[in-house]
Amino acid sequence: MAVRSIRIFGDPVLKSACAVISTIDAGTHALVRDLLDTVELPGRAGVAAPQIGVGVRAFSYNIDGDIGYILNPTLVEVRGEPEPIGEGCLSVPGLWHDTPRYPWAKAVGIDLEGNEVVLEGEGLLAQALQHETDHLDGKLYLDRLTPPTRREAMREVRESDWF
């Protein structure tokens, strides 16, 4: 349907826990189309519904050309020890910081037909699953940073031309 604009740090929708999708209707189908259109742009690994202003549990992903979506995802398993990995966010443009993330993750949800969807993997997929489910819980990657790095990131936010 449409590429939607991304909500930026400071927008309350980004800090609010999202509602479970209880009914799959025409609005849900339209949301999924918009999430898929929005994540297809170059340089995007994932887009969560709150990033386009919709407070429900859904996100799209674009990992190595594999594009898809998941509704009502829950991060059900992580493996390994958290490792710092370079991370940014469309909702915090221009910032890039090492963020502690598990090297492997698994999320479970449903598709538009109500069928179970299981996404699991390592590397960028594991990072995206953690990042996007954080969005659905009202968290930004900035919330995961170590205190000194978070202070630096918040200074960068205050000095940015978009804040």
Image (cartoon, rainbow, N blue to C red):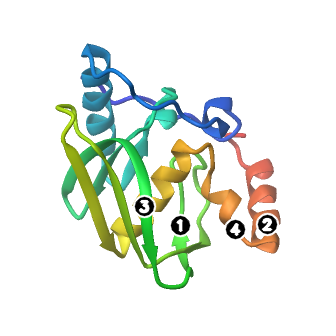
- What separation in Å lies between label 3 and label 4 (alpha carbons)? 22 Å
Specify which label sits upstream in the sequence, 2 or 3: 3
- What separation in Å lies between label 2 and label 3 (alpha carbons)? 31 Å
Question: Which label was assigned to residue 87?
Answer: 1
Q: Residue furthest top?
A: 26
Q: Is residue 64 left or right of residue 84?
A: left
Q: Quadrant of the N terminus?
A: top left
Report the residue at 81% width, 58% height from top: 155
Of 68 and 56, the residue lying toward us: 56
Report the residue at 22% width, 46% height from top: 116
Q: Which residue is mark 2?
A: 152
Q: With respect to residue 29, does 121 lie above or below?
A: below
Of 61 and 38, the residue lying toward us: 61
Q: Position of residue 50 (x, y in %)?
A: 51, 34
Q: Residues within 10 Å of mark 2 (few under 14, many from 20)?
A: few
Q: Position of residue 33 (x, y in %)?
A: 25, 29
Of 104 and 51, the residue lying toward us: 104
Q: Are marks 1 and 4 in contact (CB under 8 Å)?
A: no
- What separation in Å lies between label 1 and label 2 (alpha carbons)? 14 Å
Q: Nearer the viewer, mark 2 or mark 4?
A: 4
Q: Is residue 75 left or right of residue 117?
A: right
Q: Secondary structure at mark 3?
A: strand
Looking at the rendered structure, the kind of residue marked 2 is: Glu
Report the residue at 62% width, 59% height from top: 95
Specify which label sits upstream in the sequence, 3 or 4: 3
Q: Nearer the viewer, mark 3 or mark 1?
A: 3
Q: Which residue is mark 4?
A: 145
- What separation in Å lies between label 1 and label 4 (alpha carbons)? 10 Å
